[in-house]
Amino acid sequence: MNAQEATVLKAPKHDLWKDVKRNFSVYALLIIPAVYYFILKYGPIYNGQIAFRNFDPGTGIGGGFGQGVGGSPWVGLENFSSFFNSFYFSELIRNTVLYSFAKLLVSVPLSIILSVCLYECTRNVLRRVVQTLTYLPHFLSWVIMYGILLVLLAPGDGIVNDLITFLGDEPVDFLTSTSTFPYVVLLSDAWKEMGWAAIIFIAALMGIDPSLFEAAMVEGASAVQRVWYITIPSIKPVIVTVVLLKLGTVLDAGFNQMYMLYNVSVFSVGDIIDTWVYRQGLLNMELALATAVGIFKGIIGMLLVMISNKIVKKLTESSLL
């Protein structure tokens, strides 16, 4: 053992409490998010046992897990079985998964394309105007977006149908037709969220070394070649991270959007897990069933993230862990 190694071994261990006192203002910033996660994220875990009970709000949970003391009776996996054996289970899973993956396949590439276009734009005023107009819809609620879609797509006097009629075709009822409704869902979601999602990729693009582009220009690389061989590979870790995080919410197809847009005419293609849970859990007061579906979604999302992360880590050098 040399002198340097001996010095390291004899050095006192890092005192966390002294570090906290020295940087108290920095650690104090963690108090608010820590309280938020403890109260709204970790605290409700205890109430997850509602999924395993025949829950009655008047009776309450009782004395803990299992049979406990008093409270709503323990029924085990009965609520999960009710959901899996539901007549609409396969339809709900199909619609939810298809919408989630379709939104992923549409929104992520469009966000990347938009971010690259904004990054490559040399006119500052144009770039700022386009960026503002594209991420502004993110701040509008789906109630307002639904009103805008009605103005655009209404079968009687919608702007799009007025144009279709002017061209000599019959008007299309976009919001009540099972053949057009999925496209309305996908395009409206991309319109609303594309600009906001592009901010993440723009931030990643700002970290690329400009000398790489300068060297490529000296070598005679075109703008498309610079994007394909420099820009996209440089932000690949960010793209992988975004995709993996979205896979964790694959069973969340967008309740607010679907609740505002769907109707009885398009239930077969518009009803997803969250809208069904809303009707069963809140309107019919089957709270235990709604909790069971929430746990099911959480488990599936966690497994998808873990599996996809391992696959991506084997195929590429990028992953969450």
Image: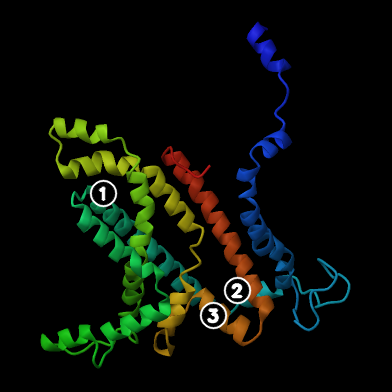
Q: Residues within 10 Å of mark 3 (few under 14, many from 20)?
A: some
Crowd around label 1: few <14 · some 14–19 · many ≥20 (10 Å):
some
Q: Secondary structure at mark 2?
A: helix
Badge 3 marks a residue whose secondary structure is helix
Crowding at mark 2 (Cα within 10 Å: few <14, some 14-19, many 20+): few
Q: Residue at x 16, y 34 (%)?
A: 217
Task: Name the amino acid type tagged 3.
Answer: Trp
Left/right placement of residue 83 relative to residue 186 reads right
Marks 3/2: CA distance? Answer: 13 Å
Q: Position of residue 135 (x, y in %)?
A: 34, 64
Can residue 45 be seen here? The reply is: yes
Q: Secondary structure at mark 1?
A: helix
Q: Going by the picture, which residue comes out furthest to the left?
A: 167
The three-letter code of the residue at mark 1 reads Tyr
Residue at 20% across / 30% down in the picture?
A: 215
Residue at numbered disc 2: 84
For label 1, the residue is 119
Total residue callouts: 3
Most extreme residue toward the right is 69
Outermost residue, top direction? 2
Q: Please name whichever residue, 95 or 319, is drawn nearer the observer in this view of the structure.
A: 319
In terms of image quadrants, where is residue 111?
bottom left
- Residue drawn at point x = 66 percent, y = 36 percent: 22
Relative depth, front residue between 201 and 105: 201
Q: Position of residue 139 (x, y in %)?
A: 40, 69
Kind of residue at badge 2 = Phe
Across and down, in percent, residue 138 comes to 38, 67
Q: Earlier in the sequence, mark 1 or mark 3?
A: 1
Q: Is residue 6 left or right of residue 238?
A: right
Q: Which mark is residue 276?
A: 3
Please tell me which residue lies in front, 45 or 28. Answer: 28
